[in-house]
Amino acid sequence: MKKYNFNAGPCVLPRPAVDAAIEAIRDFDGTGIGLIEISHRTPGWERVMAETEALWRELLGIPDTYAVLFLGGGASTQFFEVPANLMRSKAAYLQTGVWAKKAIKEAKLFGEVTVVASSEDKNYTYVPKGYTVPADADYFHITTNNTIYGTEIHTDLDSPVTLVADMSSDIMSRPVDVTKYGMIYGGAQKNVGPAGVTFVIVRKDLLGSSERKLPTMVNYATHIGAEARDNSMFNTPPVFPIFVMYQTLLWVKAQGGLEAMYKLNKKKADLLYGEIDRNPLFVGTAAKEDRSLMNVCFVMSSGNESLESEFMSFAKDRGMVGIKGHRSVGGFRASIYNACPLESVEALVKCMQDFETSKR
Ligand SMILES: *Cc1c(COP(=O)(O)O)cnc(C)c1O
């Protein structure tokens, strides 16, 4: 049976990227030796590193004043590396979900944290607005897409202080004005690759701004410049996930870049939310204006709650994979990242319609 992959992360990747990775593991770059068996100091690999960084810069329009780093440790490691590198005494955070909350917990180890607003009161089903960011904060941290709750900040915010964004689950899903941010980071495994590599885009003038003594690996400056063989090669980089990310970005570029990705993502999301709003058996959980284009959360409508497990197995029988909602929201979550084809969303919509018909 054909499978439609709606996993939240790690998740579906472009088929050409997966195929290229399989081939490279057998034979990297025509060397006769596999990608995961070569030194990261070989010219072929250094070219992959350079081209991957160049693709990031080209697709997102990242100016030279920013460093682009590929590190280990996941977005969760950035939760403490951000304050370690950027917080002198005080930082502001927007609490839009448990990932934001985890970032806040780590930041508190380094100084004073002001939570400017939180949507915890309604289980993070909306993005707070109308808050004030203290002008004396060293930075303001946001989570642009809340993977678990299906809410998203759709625009690049104006911030009175340096803006730092966890874009783990919506990076490369739309064009972004990088110059509005001091730093953007995330785990690759939701939209740009497999697990194991973390992207960090940081404005170079912010380096050292915490004036704190840092362990070598925690200091972003370590991973930039000659000692790091230009970038991200101070120590062994995660070569395999970087290679798959490289291939994924080549695919994004071939699709027409971020404008094209955004158009397709909007089309997929509109289709699915349209069905959720039309179908009397289902209801969306996120506030409409904050609905994520990446993670679509829905539950059975009032009076139909008892049908949840029945729909789950109905969908499973039709090849739907990974649509179970996160335990803190319940119901269903379809993650429709860049590499999720329109065809998968059409199949899910059809499945919801067939389920409705079966209940008449
Ligand atoms: C998944 C996720 C994380 C955690 O990423 P790891 O790489 O597993 O540490 C952090 N923030 C957001 C928004 C996420 O979706």
Image: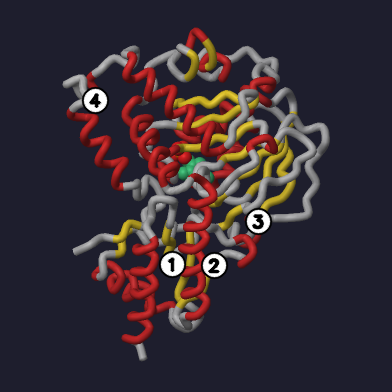
Q: Nearer the viewer, mark 4 or mark 2?
A: 4
Circles 3 and 4: CB atoms closer than 8 Å: no
| Point 35% across, 46% down: residue | 13
Q: Amino acid at mark 2?
A: Thr
Is ligand 1 less than 8 Å from the beta carbon at label 2? no
Q: Nearer the viewer, mark 4 or mark 1?
A: 4
Q: Earlier in the sequence, mark 3 or mark 4?
A: 4
Assign a secondary structure to mark 1. Answer: loop
Q: Amino acid at mark 1?
A: Gly
Q: Earlier in the sequence, mark 4 or mark 2?
A: 4
Q: Quadrant of the C terminus?
A: bottom left
| Point 22% across, 62% down: residue | 2
Q: Quadrant of residue 34?
A: top left
Q: Nearer the viewer, residue 169 or 13?
A: 13
The residue labelled by disc 1 is: 331
Assign a secondary structure to mark 3. Answer: loop
**Is residue 64 shown above or below 211?**
below
Label disc, if present, on residue 127 of the rendered structure: 3
Q: Residue furthest right?
A: 135
Assign a secondary structure to mark 2. Answer: loop
Q: Give the Cα separation between the discs numbered 2 and 3.
A: 13 Å
| x and y, in percent, of residue 85 in the image | 63, 22
The residue labelled by disc 2 is: 285
Q: Nearer the viewer, mark 3 or mark 4?
A: 4
The residue labelled by disc 4 is: 28
**Mark 2 Cα shell of 10 Å, populated few (<14), some (14-19), many (≥20):** many
Q: Residue furthest top?
A: 227
**Mark 1 Cα shell of 10 Å, populated few (<14), some (14-19), many (≥20):** many
**Is residue 340 shown above or below 189?**
below
Q: Earlier in the sequence, mark 2 or mark 3?
A: 3
